Image (cartoon, grey):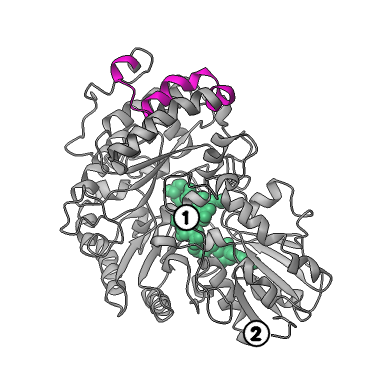
Amino acid sequence: MSNRGKKIVLAASTSESSEYLRSTWRQMLLGTLPAKYSRFPYYMVDISWKNEKHDDGQAVAVPNGLRVVESILLEKFSSDDIAVCYPDELDLFIGEDTRVVGIHAHNPLGITFATDVYAHFYGADVEPINAAEFKRLITHEAIKKHKNHLQVIVGGPGSWQIEKKNLQDEWQIDCIVDGEAEDFILDLFERAVRGESLPRHIDGKSPSMDAIPTTKNRSTFGVVEVTRGCGRGCQFCSIALRKGRSLPLEHILENVRIQVENGADTIMLTTEDIFLYEQGPKFDTNVPALKKLFESVAAVPGVKHVVQSHGTIAPIVRNPEVIEALSPVAVNMSTHTHHASTHPENRYASLFIGLETGSPRLFNQYMKGKAYPYKAEQWGDVILKGMQIMNNHNWFPFCTWIVGLPGETEEDTKKSLDLLHALRGSKWVIIPTLFVSLDETRMGGNDSAQLYNLTELQWEFFFTCWRYNLDFYRDDASFHRKFNLGVPIYYYLLGRRMFGKQMKYPIMRLAHFPEKILSRRLYLDLRKESPLKVPDSVEIPQPKARPAIPELELV
Ligand code: B12
Ligand code: SF4
């Protein structure tokens, strides 16, 4: 190509576009594993961030948000004016005619929940693969070479990270878009194409649902949005105040068809909470509508697999029949398999669920809407019951739990440990994360938790989670032998120096040290049964005593 380039180039990093082995888990690892060691066969897990591209060099799959941007731009610009690519192909598309480069940022520096933790185990200044790949994109020579006649716009759910780290000027970003952008994308890009100066920062607002276009090309993991927003009001969450709204079924199905036409065989129904879909008042789960959604998506010719992103656990306890109703699609058509599943092909449905804490006090303070219609004091029971219902139907959730919420006391951590003990033997993954203070949330003024400050109890919580995960996912004796030896070596060479002695006994639990020894030093004794039991049922408080839905100003 004589390189005059495309007027508009849209790009996403390789690691945020990756759908390697159809594994969301692997993509999440790219957000956490250190780039420095990425060339070593180090991680004992098969990862890659190489992506498929079309013959002309354009990307096959990029994050859904960028596909929405592309779709809006196509309302005004010709497809000849726009290219969507990964960093390695920027040279092909950026040239004399290029006026704007739009970049998607899901988690560009790896400083959000769950990711701002694990790279640090390898040293204080180690950056995750995701951050290295984003840097490779934003500092690409092709952008620098043509910067005098183009403007750079960065948007996406992680764009805030760039401002937080003061990198906007160093990376020569003209405009950072934070939040939903449907209402102004066209105007913004038209201004950039005309060479007008752009605002340095734009805060997006929730658009009306009919402003959300169907996409025109494939999204990573076959992501198809089914709802926007949430409204349960958790104070640490950036989506908390955006009211939950559903996209019309026909819009969803059109997006599914587009994914399939462009080569996807797996659809990820994407939402903050799948149970919000076509909900009734006060978060009433609409089981018939959900069933129809799942069945309609599954019936689109070419769809082989259906997976879902996020959900909350309270609706499962309130309406257990929803799990039964969705299982014929969610389990039978899942991409995930595990030998603990009783499905004939060992399939299981995954669902990302934030469990966050076992402390009713912290729960009540920061996130009581998450349990609605249950009360904060019932949160432990809701988790135990919900887990039982899911596991009985071969749903093995992927859960997160926040360590170091502001004001967390030893008593709070013990409550979390007690609940963790009771969850032993569940079929799940539990990822401990550290509290991250996001500017745009109501907890934005707090300090984020730091690994270096964790107490022995918090470390115990952290490594007990990973011990569970290891036992559930890697019950392979030779792996365990290597791993068990590696842990003390790590502790004495690096861990002790970086995180102090309070890490010692907790990390030995990860290495399967005998509980007989550990129980003298740690809070939990895993040889014993937990005194907490799964309740037969969890009663919804009577109307008068029902917890109020937290006072929120929803947008
Ligand atoms: C699907 C999904 C995933 C999938 C697929 C991700 C992918 N690469 O495609 C998986 C499961 C792999 C994943 C992983 C992670 N995710 Co994720 N994910 C989502 C989810 C549920 C949907 C994303 C989506 O497609 N939304 C629909 C599109 C339309 O929205 P959007 O991307 O925000 O795009 C809009 C605007 O941002 C803007 N925009 C987007 N791109 C661009 C580009 C330009 C140039 C412009 C101008 C505007 C613009 O316009 C769009 C229309 O309004 C969101 C929650 C949500 N509902 O958004 C979480 C979410 C984005 N993920 C999040 C996180 C934290 C992660 C992880 C770090 C792990 C984790 N703890 O969950 C990893 C990181 C992965 C990595 N490689 O680093 C957080 C981000 C928090 C934050 N503010 O930093 C969210 C918000 C979930 C949450 N509530 O915590 N994720
Ligand atoms: S339930 Fe809470 S954490 Fe989850 S999306 Fe809603 S407000 Fe955010």
| Label 2: few (<14), some (14–19) or many (≥20) C-alpha neighbours in 10 Å | some
Which residue is found at the position 31% from the left and 55% from the top?
A: 284
Tell me residue 38's x, y (percent): 55, 49
Q: In this orientation, which residue lies closer to the viewer: 413 or 288?
A: 413
The answer to whether residue 206 shows anywhere in this view is: no
Which of labels 2 and 1 is toward the front?
1
To which quarter of the image does residue 346 belong? bottom left
Name the residue beneath numbered marker 2. Answer: 77
Q: Amino acid at mark 1?
A: Gln
Rendered position, 89 above or below 313: below
To which quarter of the image does residue 190 belong? bottom right
Tell me residue 266's x, y (percent): 36, 69
Q: What secondary structure is found at the residue carrying circle 1? A: helix
Which residue is found at the position 19% from the left and 59% from the top?
A: 345
The answer to whether residue 81 shows anywhere in this view is: yes
Q: Is mark 1 within 8 Å of ligand 1?
A: yes
Task: Name the image quarter holding the C terminus.
Answer: bottom right
Span highlighted in magenta in the image: 494-517
As drawn, the label of residue 27 is 1
Q: Is mark 2 within 8 Å of ligand 1?
A: no
Tell me residue 469's x, y (percent): 34, 39
As drawn, the label of residue 347 is none
Tell me residue 478's x, y (percent): 31, 38
Q: Is residue 172 magenta?
A: no
Q: Is residue 498 magenta?
A: yes
